[in-house]
Amino acid sequence: MDKPLHRCMTKATIAEGDDLRYSFNWLVARRGILKVMPDALVCGNWRIPCEQIDEAVLFSIWSTVPGFVLRVRSGGTIYQFGLNWNPFWTKELPFAVTREKGKLGYSTYSIIVRIIGLGATCYLIWKHLSR
């Protein structure tokens, strides 16, 4: 068995399709180790052979914490891997990849959670100041 070229922690999902966004799907996403092998991407029981990758896009995300989202289309399934920033991802990879700057959108769920959080914070501040 080949030795991995790179190993890193990831959150991964097949529930987002082409969308690049914060959503409930990321809350329940698979957590594990992504292994970049010379001939495949491996995450848990997912094994995506490089020769079966139809399209790979590496989005550079600069939000609160810099990182990447790797979107891989293979055999009709779209995989997304959330990745911490690491110089490995800026170098040549064992599969063809398009590099783009990305911006994460917000799902309805994500917006509602943020509004509730902001409301609760404002309430607690008001409660503390009105003593």
Image (tube, helix red, strand yellow):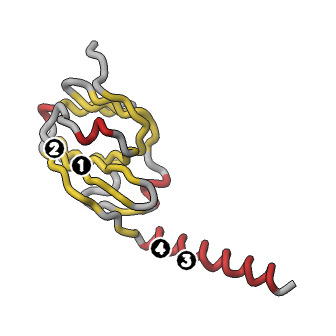
Residue that mark 3 sits on: 115
Residue 6 location, quadrant: top left
Residue located farthest toward the front when viewing the structure as drawn: 87
The residue lying toward the viewer, choosing from 60 and 79, is 60
Q: Earlier in the sequence, mark 1 or mark 4?
A: 1
In the picture shown, does residue 14 fall above or below 20?
above
Q: CA–CA distance between discs 3 and 1?
A: 30 Å
Task: Identify the residue position indicated by label 2 in the image.
Answer: 97
Query: Marks 1 and 4, Cα distance to the nearest angstrom?
Result: 25 Å
Residue 76 lies left or right of residue 21; in this view the side is left
Which residue type does callout 1 highlight? Leu
Q: According to the image, label 1 marks what residue?
A: 58
Q: Earlier in the sequence, mark 2 or mark 3?
A: 2
SS of the residue under disc 2: loop
Image marks 2 and 1: residues in contact by CB distance under 8 Å: yes
Q: Which disc is residue 100 wearing?
A: none
Given the image, on which type of amino acid does mark 2 rest? Val
Q: Residue at x 44, y 35 (%)?
A: 32
Residue in the image at 23% along x and 28% along y: 40
- State how far apart marks 2 and 1 are (Cα): 7 Å
Residue 6 visible, this orientation? yes
Q: Secondary structure at mark 4?
A: helix
Whether pointer 3 and pointer 4 mark residues with C-beta atoms closer than 8 Å, the reply is: yes
Identify which amino acid the numbered label 3 is placed on. Ile
